[in-house]
Amino acid sequence: MSENRNDDSESQIAAPSVAGRLMQPPPYNRVAVIGAGSWGTALATIAARNGRQTKLWGRNPKVIRSINAGTGNPTYLPGVALPRSLLATDDLAAALADAEAVILVTPSPTIRAMSAAIREHLAPGVPVTLCSKGIETQTGLLLSQVVEAELPGHPVGALSGPTFAGETALGHPTAATIAFPFSYEDRLNPSFSPAARMAVTMGDDMFRPYISDDLIGVEVGGAVKNVIAIACGMMTGAGFAQNTRAALITRGIDEMKLLAEALGGRRETVTGLSGAGDLTLTCSSETSRNMSLGKQLGEGLLRSECFGGKPVVVEGEVNAVSVIDLSRRIGVPMPICEAVHNVLHNGGDLRETFAELWSRPMESEPRTMDIAAHHAPGVVPANSV
Ligand SMILES: NC(=O)C1=CN([C@@H]2O[C@H](COP(=O)(O)OP(=O)(O)OC[C@H]3O[C@@H](n4cnc5c(N)ncnc54)[C@H](O)[C@@H]3O)[C@@H](O)[C@H]2O)C=CC1
Ligand SMILES: O=C(CO)COP(=O)(O)O
């Protein structure tokens, strides 16, 4: 790993230098990964291959036995050989004993309960990096706010980006953003912020983290992209092609930007890896469970028939509810997410819903100009959609 690997961070962080070089933050040497699904196993693989003492907690004894026996995690991450140094356990206390950093990566609806469950096992001040994507349905809170509420006193951040678990674990060149809010001390010395230390902990020649202090922008991108990916899948399944996908991706970014900004995040974060990057990935491939669910529905399958009837984590399905509740509450129009919500949760007809999406009143691009004031009378301004 080169000494100046963080020199093009996604935020404007002026890292202190010694003789013109960035200082190398110390990594977290003992890492606990909570959640032994595909993404948790991939992240534990990266940490272990980088020489961190890594413990992976999972609740499925068969998965734990298989990892510790050296036969990998065929249930969630088939075809990937895992580092032999990786230790799996179903005992939370054992996983978290001595941990210097925690990676939390169970599905979004479980994050509050998992945070509460790990509380008594965490040493004071240990940072928690969320790698799950979503917004809590009952409260409209970002997952980091849920973790902060359950784990006061622990720095909370997120790792997010275009990262299919299998490709990441196999060592395909991959980049992601690690965001933590910066304290005053972090601004004086950003190289030693939790974001920079996590980036050094996880980064290697195959996995390249960028650091950011815009946690809200990063989390909004991760939550909304799954809903837009379902829309892309729905329209692909209904028989439409590249023009449609490009339009949904681009207008999806616009929806992310408005929501991120309304919640206190930055628009430019949404154009980075955790927003546009992840949206492009998930909208372009059936490796994405969100895209794939949408496509099967677009092809006419019933929800119960999708994925051969097997339970699969599709974050955009549950997050369509939380995103739409939040957007309506704060008055941010998100027409693509509304369309997905209507089909998934209101029984709306897929083709009719998307036909209506495409025939909405004229809007400006970007959605800031009051076009009714500039164009024909009767045209509805963008912000009233
Ligand atoms: N798979 C991927 O490529 C990526 C996934 N993610 C995110 O990571 C999060 C986890 O997804 P995956 O690992 O892909 O899911 P997965 O379906 O591969 O695994 C889910 C894991 O969660 C566990 N789990 C389910 N219910 C639980 C509960 N009530 N309490 C504790 N554990 C529970 C399962 O035992 C399993 O280990 C999601 O938010 C997803 O959006 C983020 C980036 C990439
Ligand atoms: O978030 C992901 C890739 O970055 C995984 O997407 P899916 O959950 O749609 O499979």
Image: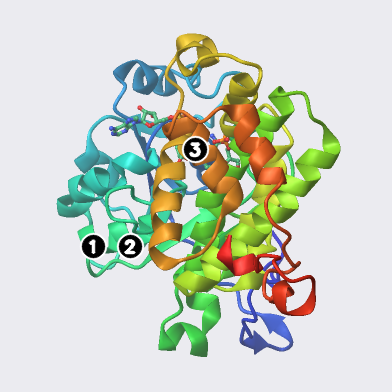
At x 74% / y 54%, what residue is drawn? 250
Question: Mark 1 and mark 2 in contact (Cβ < 8 Å)?
Answer: yes
* Category of crowding for the residue at label 2, using alpha-carbon neighbours closer than 10 angstroms: few (below 14), some (14–19), many (at least 20): some
Locate residue 196: give its quadrant.
bottom right
Q: Quadrant of the C terminus?
A: bottom right
Q: Nearer the viewer, mark 3 or mark 1?
A: 3
Res. 2 in view: yes
Q: CA distance from mark 2 to mark 3?
A: 27 Å
The residue labelled by disc 3 is 342
Camera-nearest residue between 198 and 54? 198
Q: CA distance from mark 2 to mark 1?
A: 6 Å
* Image vertical order of residue 132 relative to residue 285, above or below: below
The residue labelled by disc 1 is 149
Q: Is residue 228 left or right of residue 74?
A: right
The residue labelled by disc 2 is 145
**Residue placed farthest to the left in the image?**
120
Q: Amino acid at mark 1?
A: Ala
**Residue placed farthest to the front in the image?**
377
